[in-house]
Image (spheres, coloured by chain):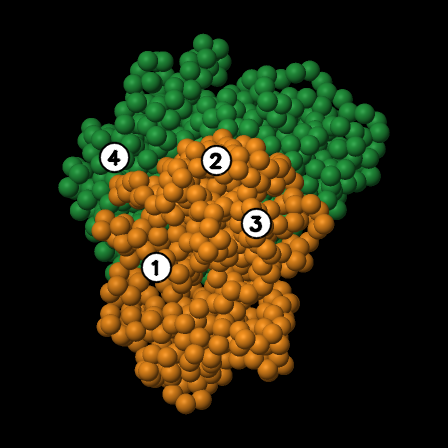
Chain colours: A orange, B green
Amino acid sequence: MAHARGYCAGVAVISPDLLAALRAAVGPTAVLVDPDVTVSYQRDMMPLAEAGVPGAVVLPADTAQVQAVVRACAGAGVPIVPRGAGSGLSGAANAVDGCVVLVTTRLDRILEIDPDNRLAVVQPGVVNLDLRDAVAKHGLFYPPDPSSYDWCTIGGNLSTNAGGLCCVKYGVTTDAVLGLEVVLADGEVLRTGRRTVKGVAGYDLARLFVGSEGTLGVITEATLALRPLPQAPGTLVAAFGATDAAGAAVSRVVREGVVPSLMEIMDATSIAVVETYLRTELGAGRGCAALLICQSDAGGEAARAELAVIEQVCRDAGAELTHVTFDPAESAMFLTARRAVLTALEIYGAWLTDDVCVPRTRIAELIAGCERIGAEVGLRIAVVGHAGDGNMHPTIVYDPGSADEFARARTAFDEILALGMELGGTITGEHGVGRIKRDWLAREIGPIALRVHREIKAALDPGNLFNPGSMFSSSGR
Amino acid sequence: MAHARGYCAGVAVISPDLLAALRAAVGPTAVLVDPDVTVSYQRDMMPLAEAGVPGAVVLPADTAQVQAVVRACAGAGVPIVPRGAGSGLSGAANAVDGCVVLVTTRLDRILEIDPDNRLAVVQPGVVNLDLRDAVAKHGLFYPPDPSSYDWCTIGGNLSTNAGGLCCVKYGVTTDAVLGLEVVLADGEVLRTGRRTVKGVAGYDLARLFVGSEGTLGVITEATLALRPLPQAPGTLVAAFGATDAAGAAVSRVVREGVVPSLMEIMDATSIAVVETYLRTELGAGRGCAALLICQSDAGGEAARAELAVIEQVCRDAGAELTHVTFDPAESAMFLTARRAVLTALEIYGAWLTDDVCVPRTRIAELIAGCERIGAEVGLRIAVVGHAGDGNMHPTIVYDPGSADEFARARTAFDEILALGMELGGTITGEHGVGRIKRDWLAREIGPIALRVHREIKAALDPGNLFNPGSMFSSSGR
């Protein structure tokens, strides 16, 4: 569990007129104002980001209710912070003082699954896993699978352009988006995109809203492209005595032209905590510095051939141990181990996970750098990540009761971002900017791109109604 | 050859001051003003669209020269029409009277190919085929392959978000874009996107510029994601006595969860003209109403298995003849036949190709509708298209010397768009809006989305410098 931390201001109140308008918009039971209740909607899972006190939390049940909330808030000049399940890791769903938190979890219907055109139409409050399960019944697959897939919502996934473990082969959320319905700052409903596979009628507005972290509008419906359900995967595990050998193996797999359906890396710290937590042996052996977990979902001989190439590459790169399995239970066990890292780290304290994405050739350097940074700040840093696409999650463990450790964790967090940029990477591969990486965004994209961001924000949300101060400051400060 | 047609105003002149500034910007030999020369840069390949007379044509050789041209034109209040090779089919590169046509063909360098990170950095004037050939030497693949791939440029592909035959499996141009460099309306250089596989730092500006048809800036560099070079394809050809049987086969292939690397359809008219033109038999036999050409590049047994599934589906749907080949020459022959349709139609007159994309379940209805429309207007309409993604190119043949036939061709063109929308499709799957479908864009996306387009255009190009009147009118008329 990430621990709430950071800046919390006092009690925020909302005007009686706006309160009445919100109650009229969504019904009295869907407007929450009790601070003991609204505190649950104050922040996401990122402990570093500041969070204000919401004036109210509203839970609309349809697009018309979202429109009414937006119009009421716009009229009153009160900002709206859109929110899904709150599983985010950047503070993008964190309240600002006196705002209205607009929660989309009640917009939770799968409106349509169309197997012949391989698409689904969903509301934003649908839980990722529920969509996956529903389409699987039709032999279909919705790829994006963030770690929180069993509780995060599609709306949050869209707003952050979420990734996951599947991205190396199947891309991120934006790659699955065909069309969107969005409530704009003046309460009008924008429908953009299409139901067809291809379409170039006008600007790609759908992909502008995807990843915009709730700063441009409230997504109320999405048309999503699906894929055929892949074959049950075969799994390869390779243990390396040195992280640079594991890094070299990743580059070499890319060069060999094999595209695994999953390619995860765990460093020594991650392996150790998971073995302790799950009370199991991952078979990495003593002195294992890094474990690569690769899958192929190509099926049958094709999967065996892909994994054989990867196995050979790993051996050539110096893997001390490789193991291939097509046993579903064993495959699942390795995935469970990979997914357990963050939870396992809670044995040692609170965690703070970073999200740099580097060129795949620089993974080993990133891991080595994180080791160095960990030593410098005197904190445990476990590196785990999506090696196949270079998106790494160095995770810093600290004592939440110690202000000093918290400060050192923050230092490490920033140093990892600097390192990621130095290696030609980005400050965020899939978690987003939110309130925690605002200054870093400016540093990464530079003044011209920042200006273009502000121009687009001002054009679509001139009153700065939506999620003000998230991603970047609109004021030009 | 499409014949130039439409609205051409008189001679346009450019002020001596601007001319001097342009010559200073790009050098005197790279500024063309002789009307006999500039006429070649007046329009693209779409005969219906209006085209004005350019005041000058400039051919900058680097980003700094593009900046200087943009600043000079912005200062003089003279619009810029960005242009690649001019292979477009929407009039998006057509001149407006007195404008400066900014041609990017001299920005033709492949700056980098990075096999370990599977990316290329290119200038916009690189010809699509040249990039394909260059990356193939590294075992890599740049998928987008519009029909004009042997002469169209990457800049034009980016501006129109071009597709091609590969899209059913590999997506369109935007799916290959990692980052862009763009010269903005004030001459500043925007760098957006990244070199990493994933990245969510800020708005997805790169994908906003992709497909914006030169209305928001001039793309001067692109970082493109590459894929491993696929295996040599196996090819299946299936002949159907009825188009609805072919349409049913397409839907059924989608439902079976097979993703061919290519899935093209040719109707009876297309087959007949190609057989005449190439003096070959496609083996479709008498009474063939539609031919499906499918490929699998999965390699070896996987390809055989995929094509076997598709073959069975085609037979079940009523195919009268199926043929599978792994002979590269025979595979290439079928592709040549498919790609020859437009050229072959020139035996009968000029052609006017449409570009609707419909849900894959509605392909047969679209073909039947085109047959009906052709009968109504008394013109030959050949339907050819990317069946795997529903993107169809009904192509109307008319006598360019007959104003009456031209008018009827235009009527048919519009009726096909109306039909595409009626079937739940879009007015353009890959060619774009340009000057020819501006009114149709408004009809498809509606007033709210159109307003958002105008807001974004006004935010990024407040002086309406870039390609004014293309895609939509900025004035709100």
Above-or-below relation of B366 to A264 = above
Would residue B344 be found to the left or right of residue B153 on screen? Answer: left
Look at discs 1 and 3 and give the one toward the viewer: 3
Give the residue type that dot 2 points to.
Ala
Instruction: Give neighbour class at mark 1: few <14, some 14-19, many 20+ (Cα, 10 Å).
Output: few
In the picture of the structure, the residue carrying the numbered disc 2 is A20
Give the residue type that dot 1 points to.
Asp
Distance CA(mark 1)–CA(mark 3):
32 Å
Pick whichever of labels 1 and 2 is earlier in the sequence: 2
Distance CA(mark 2)–CA(mark 4):
55 Å
Name the one closer to the observer, B340 or B374. Answer: B374
The disc placed on residue A172 is none
Helix, strand or loop for disc 3: loop
Q: Given the image, what chain letter belongs to the residue carrying mark 1?
A: A
Pick whichever of labels 1 and 3 is earlier in the sequence: 3
Distance CA(mark 3)–CA(mark 4):
60 Å
Residue at figure coordinates x 41%, y 90% from the top left:
A286
Pointer 2 and pointer 4 on the same chain: no
Indicate the position of residue A267 as horizontal and vertical percent values: 47, 78
The disc placed on residue A12 is 3
Distance CA(mark 3)–CA(mark 2):
17 Å
Residue at figure coordinates x 46%, y 72% from the top left:
A384
Instruction: Give neighbour class at mark 2: few <14, some 14-19, many 20+ (Cα, 10 Å).
Output: some
CB within 8 Å, label 1 to label 2: no
Helix, strand or loop for disc 4: helix
Q: Given the image, what chain letter belongs to the residue carrying mark 3?
A: A
In the picture of the structure, the residue carrying the numbered disc 1 is A150
Indicate the position of residue A110 as horizontal and vertical percent values: 31, 44
Name the one closer to the observer, A159 or B311. Answer: A159
Distance CA(mark 1)–CA(mark 2):
35 Å
Indicate the position of residue B238 as horizontal and vertical percent values: 23, 40
